[in-house]
Every structure is written in structure tokens, then in C-alpha cells.
Image (cartoon, helix red, strand yellow):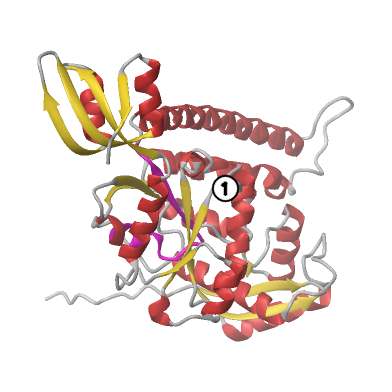
Amino acid sequence: MTRLHTVRQSVPAVIGLAVQMPGQPDAEIEHSLTELAELLKTLGARMVGSLIQKRSGPSRSNYFGTGKIEEVKLKAEELGAKYIAVDDELSAMQIKSLEAGTGLPVKDRTSIILDIFAAHASTREGKLQVELAMHQYQLPRLLRMWTHLERQRGGIGLKGPGETQLETDRRILNIKIKKLQEELDRVSRARELQGRKRNDRFAPLFSLVGYTNAGKSTLLNALSGSSVQMCNGLFTTLDPTARRVELPEGHWCIVSDTVGFIRKLPHGLVSAFKATLECVIQSEVMLIVCDVSDPQFREHLAAVDEVLNQIGASDHERIYVFNKIDKGISVSEELLAAAYPDHIMISAAEGTNVDRLKRMIEKIMRRNRRHVEIYLPVGSPYVGEAMTIGRIFSQEWGEGEVKIKAELPVSFIKLLTDNNLKVEPMER
């Protein structure tokens, strides 16, 4: 009889490297390495140790100094590390030098994040965006793959095979990048059209924005009663998810979840995911979700601001939603109130203050709504529109006309008056 044995796949051991520059606090560099360890964990690897070198900046050729690279090699052997992970984005030369000096494969922070995105992308759009970012990352690093051929030269006026192959690969990558950008442009135009249709339906849009693993998907579930999949890991939401949220006094809105941000988020990823982030630009108000139990929450908010600046959404109205108060608060509420006047403390996991957040959203909506009496022809498409987007108080159906008392968006009221339909203020 054949016996079956359970084979456990070993977790790759990784050693992390970071450069600490002048004026950079120890706590900041340690937190960044802890975050790198979480990124590796999400990929299925384990950081078994780390080395930090204090320098004015990373070496352009080696990242670390040559003496420190030898120390990395010895420590990797001691800890049984099979890979090296660097907490910065590396050039082709830096990767080549580190691999030659340590004898181990090297991955930088950007390639690790790209691998995580590739593992989590589920929709066609998400996969396109990740593929584009990967090609953009690979393009300036092609030289590293062909250094064994670069010294081979042809005769006068001829190119060596290494140079020829490099140019061929670069041309192929550029063609792929162009095609992906064109396809994503089509996606972006389709999303923009959807946004215009949403505006035409006068459905107010609120976007959940924040650092990765801040609890945005949990909050969306708490607000909408839906069951968006939640995972305790980094970048578990890549594709935007929108849900209708019913508010306490009869209103409703659309709340959209978005990809989480992170410090040192590769610029190529921000560009590639711009189509996905269009919903943030189109939103009426951004709900900035932050894990207030994390002592580094200010740095997380700064990283979020940086990305919002890149996509042109820095001037949007925002509510700061300080989440995970069930895990404790890293600073006093007085300091938070002074620094962030428009904030609310919640626990999305336990439902604490979620109803209060809904009331805040409803209060914002009311600013652009009025109580009116409208008179519409029976059969007018605006009748159904008013019923869908408005808070209806009464309706009277007469011969050829319907009189509706409702609370309606100002923009919808203007549409009616522009079409010479009768609108009067409602007596209250």
C-alpha cells in the first residue's frame, strides 16, 4: 500500500537592507523595514534579519559600501537567507553589483510591490494596469540582462549582438507599453463615461481613500451591509468596489473603495492605476481612512497626500475617519481634534460610530438639496428620475400632470428649470 506524505513548502528566508540618511529617525527606518517584512510576508516569504547602513545616500553603483556588502554576504550565510530585499528602488547597476557581491538574487521594494499587485489583480483592468507598471519598471533595467554580450562588437559600422538584442528587447517592450496604454485609455474613457452617467443620475459619490490595510473594505461593509472580501494583508483591494449606502433619514449615496496607498509607492504604479483612481477625482467628498492605533499614522497620511497630489485630487473636500479605535489610540483625542478638525473616531470592525459617520455624510448631501414642488407631464422621464434620486414627500397624479413634493439635488432642479418645467419652493 502506497503511503501519502504531507509535503510542507518551506518559506523563503530573506534578509532586508536599508540606507538611513542624515536626519532620518531610527524609528522611521525601523518602521519602513517592518513594512518591508509585511510586504514579503504577503508574498509568502519571511524576513529573517536586516542590515542598515548610515550614509548620505545610497551608493549609485552598489547601494551599500563595498565593505558592508561583504557583511551582508556573511550575515545571509549565517541566517540561511536565500534572497535579499532592499527597501528602496534600485537601478540595474545596483542590482547587478549586489548580486555579484553576495551571490544571492536581489529584489527591490518596487519589484516586491509589483509582484503583490500581480498576485492580487483579478479583473482584466487590474491585470492590464499591473502589466503596464511591470513593463515600465523593466525597461530601464534591460541592460542588466545582456551584459554578457555587450563587449561583442561587429566590424566597422556594425553593431555587436548584445547591442542588437538590447535594442530589439527595448523596442518590443515599448510596443507592449504603447498597446497597454491605449487599452487602459479606453478603460479610462469608459470609466469617465460611467462617471458622467452617475452625475447625470445625480447619485452623490464618496470615496474611501487611505493607507493600505487601514480598514477601508471593512468600513464599506459596515456602511453598506455588503460583504466585500476582507483580508488582513497589504494591497488586498486593487479594483474599485462601489456600493449603495442607505442613510438614516431616507437619503442614499454611492461609496467607492479604492486601492490602498503606501510609502515609496512606485510612480509607475500610480500612473498605471490612474484609471482606477478616477473615482476619487470624481467623488464629492473623500473619506480619508486611517488606522489611528498605528504610531506611524501621520506618516501614512503624508503618503496618502502625496498620491492625491499626483492624481490631482488634493483639493477635494475630505473627512478624516480614524479607524480601529478598538485597538487603542496612539495619540490623545485633543491633539487629533486640533490637527484634524473634520474627523470622526470609529471602529469599522465593531460598528462603533458608523451611524454617526452616515449622519455626517447625509449632512454634506443636504447642502446641495432643496425642498421643492415640481410639476411634470405624465410619462416624462424626469418622473422616474425624481423618484430615484429624491426624497419624496407626496405625489398627486392629475390629468396629464403629476405634482411631486420632494427634496431634490440643486443640479437636478436646474435641469428641470432649464427645460422650462415648473418648479416652486415647497412650503414647510
Q: Residue furthest bottom?
A: 78
Q: Residues within 10 Å of mark 1 (few under 14, many from 20)?
A: many
Q: Is residue 367 left or right of residue 265?
A: left
Q: Is residue 410 above or below residue 277?
A: above
Q: Amino acid at mark 1?
A: Leu
Q: Nearer the viewer, residue 73 or 157?
A: 73
Image point (37%, 39%), residue name: 369
Q: Is residue 265 above or below residue 64?
A: above
Q: Position of residue 48 (x, y in %)?
A: 55, 81
**Quadrant location of the C terminus?**
top left
Q: Is residue 230 above or below residue 423?
A: below
- Identify the residue under disc 1: 269
Element under label 1? helix
Q: Is residue 370 left or right of residue 110?
A: left
Q: Position of residue 181 (x, y in %)?
A: 55, 31
| Region of the chain picked out in magenta, as a range | 203-221
